[in-house]
């Protein structure tokens, strides 16, 4: 069966490179970010690893020539970036970004069209002042990122004869408001409903329990701030950029980001998750001692953005990974060309 994509394999490869270059240039100029090199693995005892929801097992190994130190392939660079900002001496109002490549073999939704064992994203972090720990600053940063996405969509669609579909403005909504707006739905059903309604949404406040006692989605306790109260019944200075994907007819997450924890918020969130012992890890000790700058940061999926803007049906059309045999068979039957 012929492919359902408008682009051939080689056209897709060229477009991915074009897209990434354009987005990086737009992002770095608008956010004042410096590109830096980043690790693929970290010392397991450093506290730098992103523990995600706490159930994902990192790929780990030992280098005999070094000793018994256990290294782990990163899940993300959320904490490493904050340390790097301090080491590089980057001033307030500027930041860094890097190519982050991770492996998440415990990904439970590997048979879906939007998940993969291989994770690639632009990991970015910017130094902010303590008095910018508020929703206005968070929203302004989100709008800057979204404008970079819109500019890249315009560039790609004009060059590859694709039709634009993203709205010109992104809508802000808190996860509590979302719960009230769409009662009786699951978290993912609520995301589908709000993205279908507004086209592009920044969902605020992810990680802490909502009024129904459940979290909208999981977040680790030691990078994003999901505790700070911003209004009565509203907590959190973090969130996700979600858009409606017309090819998949569903909500589509592009980025997770937020204002990072202060020493006080880190202590609160470690206690809330019952992992106070992390306070003794090297990275956490530095933060609690006030040796790391206040930052805002996040990750933007490279394959996710490529899949969205090149209007692909499967993430395997824009990256090389591994898939279950039945998923490969399904893609072949539906004319989806996996790289």
Image (spheres, rainbow, N blue to C red):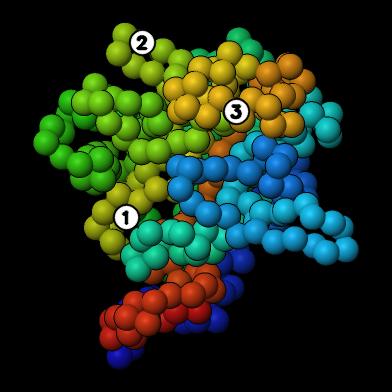
Mark 1 or mark 2, whichever is nearer to me? 2
Percent coordinates x, y for residue 326 in the rendering: 32, 80
Please give the label number shown on residue 277.
3
Tell me the residue that label 1 is attached to. 245
Percent coordinates x, y for residue 63 in the rendering: 80, 62
Gap in Å between the C-alphas at discs 1 and 2?
A: 31 Å
Gap in Å between the C-alphas at discs 2 and 3?
A: 31 Å
Q: Residue at point 66% right, 54% down?
A: 72
Tell me the residue that label 2 is attached to. 231
Q: Answer whether residue 47 is visible to the viewer in this image.
A: yes
The disc, 3 or 1, on the residue closer to the chain's N-terminal end is: 1
Q: Residue at point 33% right, 85% down?
A: 329
Please tell me how crowded label 2 is: few (under 14), some (14-19), or many (20+) other residues with Cα within 10 Å: few
Gap in Å between the C-alphas at discs 3 and 1?
A: 41 Å
Considering only vertical position in the picture, is 146 above or below 13? Answer: above
Residue farthest toward the bottom in the current orientation of the protein: 1
Residue 88 vs residue 248, the one in the foreground = 88
Q: Residue at point 54% right, 74% down?
A: 320
Q: Answer whether residue 237 is visible to the viewer in this image.
A: no
The disc, 2 or 3, on the residue closer to the chain's N-terminal end is: 2
């Amino acid at each position: 069966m012929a492919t359902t994509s408008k682009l051939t394999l080689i056209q897709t490869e060229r477009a991915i490179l074009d897209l990434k270059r354009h987005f990086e240039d737009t992002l770095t100029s608008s956010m004042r970010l410096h590109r830096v090199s980043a690790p693929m693995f970290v010392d397991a005892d450093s506290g730098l690893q992103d523990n995600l929801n706490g159930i994902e097992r990192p790929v780990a190994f030992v280098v005999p020539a070094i000793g018994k130190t256990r290294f782990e392939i990163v899940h993300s660079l959320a904490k490493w970036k904050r340390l790097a900002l301090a080491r590089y001496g980057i001033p307030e109002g500027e930041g860094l970004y890097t190519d982050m490549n991770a492996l998440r073999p415990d990904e439970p939704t590997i048979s879906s069209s939007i998940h993969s064992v291989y994770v690639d994203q632009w990991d970015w972090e910017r130094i902010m002042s303590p008095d910018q720990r508020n929703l206005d600053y968070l929203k302004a940063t989100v709008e800057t990122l979204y404008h970079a996405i819109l500019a890249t969509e315009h560039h790609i669609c004009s060059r590859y004869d694709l039709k634009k579909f993203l709205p010109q403005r992104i809508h802000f909504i808190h996860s509590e408001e979302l719960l009230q707006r769409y009662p009786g739905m699951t978290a993912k059903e609520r995301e589908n409903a709000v993205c279908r309604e507004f086209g592009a949404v920044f969902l605020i406040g992810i990680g802490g329990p909502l009024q129904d006692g459940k979290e909208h989605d999981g977040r680790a306790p030691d990078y994003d701030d999901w505790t700070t109260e911003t209004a009565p019944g509203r907590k959190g200075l973090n969130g996700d950029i979600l858009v409606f994907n017309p090819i998949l007819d569903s909500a589509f997450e592009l980025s997770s980001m937020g204002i990072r924890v202060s020493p006080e918020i880190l202590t609160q969130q470690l206690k809330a998750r019952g992992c106070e012992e992390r306070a003794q890890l090297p990275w956490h000790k530095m933060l609690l001692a006030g040796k790391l700058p206040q930052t805002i940061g996040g990750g933007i999926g490279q394959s996710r953005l490529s899949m969205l803007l090149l209007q692909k049906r499967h993430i395997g059309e824009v990256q090389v990974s591994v898939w279950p045999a039945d998923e490969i068979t399904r893609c072949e039957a539906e004319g989806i060309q996996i790289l």
